[in-house]
Amino acid sequence: MRTFEVLELFAKRRTPLHLLEIYTALGYPQSSTTNLLKSMVMMGYLNYNRAKRTYLPTTRISMLGNWLPGYIQASGGYRQLAEELQRRTDETVGLVSQNDLYIQYILMLAPTHEYKSPPNTGAMRLMIDSSAGLPLMARMKDREIEKIWRYTRYYRLDEGNPISLTDLMREVNWVRHVGYAYAPKRPTPQVSSISMALDGDLFGTPIAIGVGGMADRLAANQLSIIETMQELIQDFAAGSSSPKHPCRRPKRRSGNSRRVPRGQARSA
């Protein structure tokens, strides 16, 4: 655990760090931090500048995950689906997988305009407190959802934003009814998201896809975004959005589309 916390500290600071800076930031004892950093240097994951007495991750770190983009690219054409959805909606699109009690963003595609606030690839949110988690749970049995909720409560992972099992099941049942989760102004008042589960999986792991963006933009285009998602996912499942031939149709941003049931859920 501490090894990853050290690496995440470097990802946040993006600069060489002294021993004092590392153990102070992470709240570790100096002696154990020294031993940990020495081990990481010995394994080639950290570089130690003896003259300046600073540490810095090496390129070996990037090698641990540089195969993942190709892994996703080769897994059923999901990246092409996400790219087409991003092109059609002109908003942030994320591909999400379940990771134990969490959802994790495994692919993020952001628009070129300034009206965006995408989470980082690899970031995680609780299943029970995310719009992407709701459609994934909607495909589970009720007792499986209750188990996720109970473990989340047992480990106190939702402190500060608790939800009752009754409220959670109400939201899940609504997603089962309409087929999507709409999270207005969550996790912050500035952003909203819309998520749907996909029929396939990523080597056995359930996945969902979502569109996120500034709350006012998604509110104005909610219906057309939902219809675009439904259309692309249906075409993708039918095979018309294969990796070689992704569907390419004009953007539809008008709010005058046929009405789609409104969903109310929690954050992305």
Image (cartoon, rainbow, N blue to C red):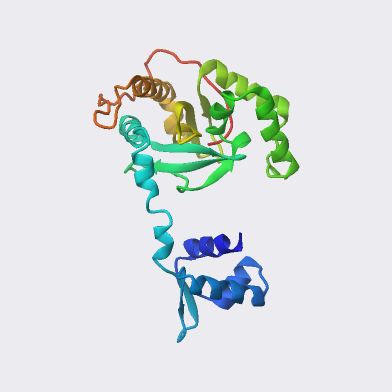
Res 116 seen here: no
Along the line of sight, the residue nearer the viewer: 117 or 109: 109
Q: Indicate the position of residue 241 as horizontal and vertical percent values.
A: 30, 26
Q: Indicate the position of residue 37 as horizontal and vertical percent values.
A: 55, 73
Res 253 seen here: yes
| Count of picture labels | 0
Above or below residue 83? Residue 166 is above
Quarter of the figure with residue 143: top right
- In the picture, the quarter occupied by the N terminus is bottom right
Horizontal arrangement in the rendering, residue 56 relative to residue 252 (left or right): right
| Farthest-out residue, right | 154
Above or below residue 4? Residue 148 is above
Q: Residue at x 40, y 12 (%)?
A: 258
Quarter of the figure with residue 49: bottom left
Q: Indicate the position of residue 207 as horizontal and vertical percent values.
A: 48, 33
Above or below residue 256? Residue 91 is below
Q: Residue at x 61, y 19 (%)?
A: 173
Along the line of sight, the residue nearer the viewer: 257 or 176: 176
Q: Indicate the position of residue 253 as horizontal and vertical percent values.
A: 34, 25
Q: Residue at x 60, y 40 (%)?
A: 100
Quarter of the figure with residue 59: bottom left
Above or below residue 58? Residue 78 is above
| Farthest-out residue, top | 258
